[in-house]
Amino acid sequence: MIGFERSCWGIVLAFAAASTCCASDYDIIDLGTLGGPWGKAWDINSEGVIVGTAYTDDLFDRAVMWGDDFVGTELGTLGGDRSRAYAINDNGAVVGYANTESGESHAFVFEDDAFTDLGTLGGRNSVAWDINAHGNIVGWAHTESGVYNATLWADGGAVGLGTLGGDYSIAYGINSYDVIVGVAEKISGSDRAAMWLGDEIIDLGVLEGGTWSTAKGINDYEQVIIWADTAWGDSHACLWEDGSIIDLGTFGGDDSWAYGLNNLGHVVGWAESANGTYQGFFYDGEQMHNLGTLGGAFSAAYGINDYDRIVGLSQTVSGEMHAVLWQPTPEPMTLTLFGFGVLFALRRRRGRD
């Protein structure tokens, strides 16, 4: 069944590539905040529903959702005063973390207008970073000893995923086939981008001359976005595929960071310019494009869906940081919509099998 689905993915992605190859320009839409001076959009699903975090007018950061009208709706907390939303799947389930009444920070899933506290691995705190089409959630949770461990929440329970011989690990991404990526400490004490395939943990390596790496996301073709240091000590956004790491570079500055990846192999994040400012980038498989800002000096992209709609944050002319949506122009063709309709039907079928 998986082989058949991946073959269909090839057809769907061919449709999508044909419809997006000419989308070289983006309109930037200001999603604002919840009344305060800062907002950040973290993720967008195939329906165009956006989630993230924004300050209220009393400067509390709260999980927020933006719908078709681009008006932010606060999701609430687990009894405390703060929350953040990091990911949303195509069924509308949202994950992140929220403060409890006792002051702990716990991973949550928000669906059907209600919060569910996902708990921990026996310790105080946890964070959920991603959720896949089947509702399986990954992140990290404290153990009884206070160490944080990459965690999978599935079938009503929480499971620690282990490390590469060191003390700690974090899971940042999970694809439709339950392949998980993140970072795990080696016995030597260095951090490495890691992939969990069932009970197996794979070290994804580093850039030549580098010493550490972290995997931030994975698509259904097992392409992985990575942060890694160079031989010169800079931090660069990278794309891992079939054992090779591609350095995506910068806008002339020292550093870049990748945060989002879609099934077309397109990557978003932010990159430093020669003047020390940073702007959101869109990597189309060949080169990095500057997404621009709302008039200020800075922007950053954090999420991208399979229609190349991108979300993140941007500085305004007045200096505030607002959540934003970068909308591709022209819009994707209806042929792509048909292709993804086939794809989502296959996903739902696999979920029932």
Image (cartoon, helix red, strand yellow):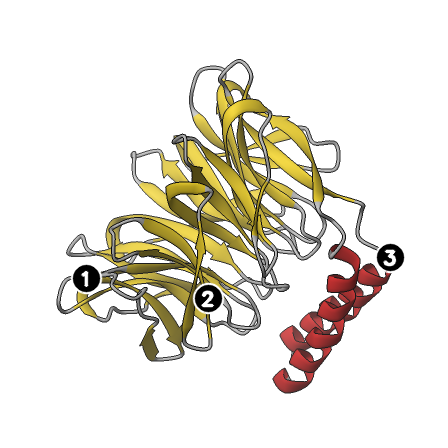
Q: Residue at x 45, y 38 (%)?
A: 84
Q: Amino acid at mark 2?
A: Ala
The residue singled out by tag 1 in the image is 190
Q: Secondary structure at mark 2?
A: strand
Real-space Cα distance between discs 1 and 2?
29 Å
In the foreground, 171 or 258: 258
* Spot occupied by residue 73 in the image (x, y as percentages of width and height): 62, 30
Q: Is residue 134 visible?
A: yes
Q: Quadrant of the C terminus?
A: bottom right
Sequence-first tag of 1 and 2:
2
Which residue appears farthest toward the right when viewing the image? 334
Sequence-first tag of 3 and 2: 2
* Gap in angstroms between the C-alphas marked 3 and 2: 35 Å
Which of the two discs, 1 and 3, labels the residue nearer the N terminus? 1
Count numbered badges in the picture: 3
- Label 1 and label 3: CA atoms lie apart by 47 Å
In the displayed structure image, the side of residue 308 where residue 84 appears, left or right? left
Characterize the local packing of mark 1: few (<14), some (14-19) or many (20 or more) Cα atoms within 10 angstroms: few
Residue at mark 2: 154
Which label is found at residue 334? Answer: 3
Which quarter shows the N terminus? bottom right
Mark 1 element type: loop
For residue 80, side relative to residue 40 (left or right): left
